[in-house]
Amino acid sequence: MNDSLLALTLAFEFAAQKHIDQRRKGLRAEPYLNHLAEVAGLLARASGGRDPVLVIAGLLHDTVEDTATTAAELEQEFGAEVAALVLEVTDDKTLAKSERKHRQVTTAPHKSARARLIKIADKTSNLRAVALSPPEGWSVARRLDYFNWARQVVAGCRGLNPDLEAWFDQAFREGMARLGEEGGGAGGEPG
């Protein structure tokens, strides 16, 4: 077994343990690990499997933000490069949600290329989930707001990977069409 495969397998196991009791907020309440696996899969396909650090960081991207994991723990387990990348995409949970969302939009263009790729993959996965299994109580208007906010974040991340951007655009279009059917007509184009 090569080192990259071993590292990826250990990262998957680590993420599974750290997020063991977490579920997605959607009506289907999928295990949170499904989201992390989808993000890692999008990044693996987008990079042609040639960037294990990116894929591992994608798998671990929510550990510091959403679990008791520390940056030091990530660095010890997966190295400084992975830990730094995870920290780069980690929101500051001490800030109000509206401020965190605003900062994602304003800081996205200034992130490293890898961090921007993780942002696109994360938002793609989230749009798919919101469209197919929205959180309980989320109105069509709230889901539209989320879609438009995600589009703003991704707008600052474009120009790196046409495939990943196309997958985001597809998730956006399909989700907007679904929301349009539910809400009697919703518009918006990615870009």
Image (cartoon, helix red, strand yellow):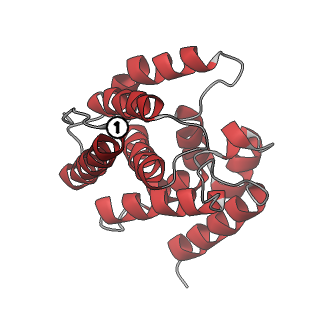
Give the residue drawn at x 41%, y 46%: 127
Relative height, residue 95 to residue 111 (above, below): above
Q: Position of residue 103 (x, y in %)?
A: 48, 18
* Residue 14 in the figure: left or right of residue 191: right
Q: Quadrant of residue 6?
A: bottom right
Relative height, residue 106 to residue 42 (above, below): above
Question: Which image quarter holds the C terminus?
Answer: top left
Most foreground residue, 183 or 43? 183
Q: Is residue 62 visible?
A: yes
* Residue 71 in the figure: left or right of residue 51: right
Kind of residue at disc 1:
Gly
Most foreground residue, 128 or 5? 128
Q: Name the outermost residue toward the bottom.
A: 1
Relative height, residue 53 to residue 70 (above, below): below
Q: Position of residue 63 (x, y in %)?
A: 68, 46
Q: Position of residue 132 (x, y in %)?
A: 44, 55
Q: Which residue is mark 1?
A: 183
* Residue 27 in the figure: left or right of residue 107: right
Question: Which image quarter holds the N terminus?
Answer: bottom right
Give the residue drawn at x 51%, y 54%: 133
Q: Secondary structure at mark 1?
A: helix
Give the residue drawn at x 46%, y 24%: 104
* Residue 56 in the figure: left or right of residue 54: right
